[in-house]
Image: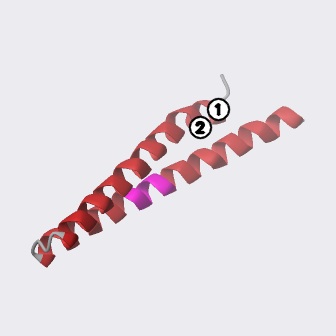
C-alpha cells in the first residue's frame, strides 16, 4: 500500500475524533459559563477544548495533504 494512503487512513479518523472532542469540550465550557460556575473552571475547560480542537484541525489538515499527494500520484 502507498505510504501516503496509509498516512491518510491513520490521520483522518484521529483528526476527526479530536475535532469532535474539542467541540464537545468547548460546548461543556459554554454550559458551565451559562450556569454561572466560577470563571476559572470554564476558562480552563474552554482553553483545553480549543487546544484539542486545533490539534484535530492540524492533524486532519496533515491527512488531507497525504491524500492529495496520493491522488496526484494516481494521475501520473
Q: Residue at the spot x=43%, y=61% of the render?
A: 54
> Which quadrant is home to the C terminus?
top right
Badge 2, how many Cα within 10 Å: few under 14, some, many 20+?
Answer: many
* In the depicted structure, whether residue 59 falls above or below residue 45: above
Q: Which residues are magenta?
A: 53-57
The image position of residue 55, as x and y in percent, is: 42, 56
Q: Name the magenta segment's main secondary structure.
A: helix
Instruction: Tell me how far mark 1 sits from mark 2, CA to CA.
Output: 5 Å
Residue 43 x, y percent position in the rendering = 21, 73
Side of 41 where 21 appears, left or right? right
For disc 1, the marked residue is 5
Residue drawn at 73 percent across, 43 percent down? 69
Residue position for label 2: 8
Instruction: For mark 1, give the secondary structure.
Output: helix
User: Which residue is pictured at 65% across the width and 49% down the height?
Assistant: 65
Marks 1 and 2 close (CB-CB < 8 Å):
yes
Query: Observer-nearest residue: 60 or 49?
Result: 49
Image x and y of residue 73, in percent: 81, 36
Amino acid at each position: 500500500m502507498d505510504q501516503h494512503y496509509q498516512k491518510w487512513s491513520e490521520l483522518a479518523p484521529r483528526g476527526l475524533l479530536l475535532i469532535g472532542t474539542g467541540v464537545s469540550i468547548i460546548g461543556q465550557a459554554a454550559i458551565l459559563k451559562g450556569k454561572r460556575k466560577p470563571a476559572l473552571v470554564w476558562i480552563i475547560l474552554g482553553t483545553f477544548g480549543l487546544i484539542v480542537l486545533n490539534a484535530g484541525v492540524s492533524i486532519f489538515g496533515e491527512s488531507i495533504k497525504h491524500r492529495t499527494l496520493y491522488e496526484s500520484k494516481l494521475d501520473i
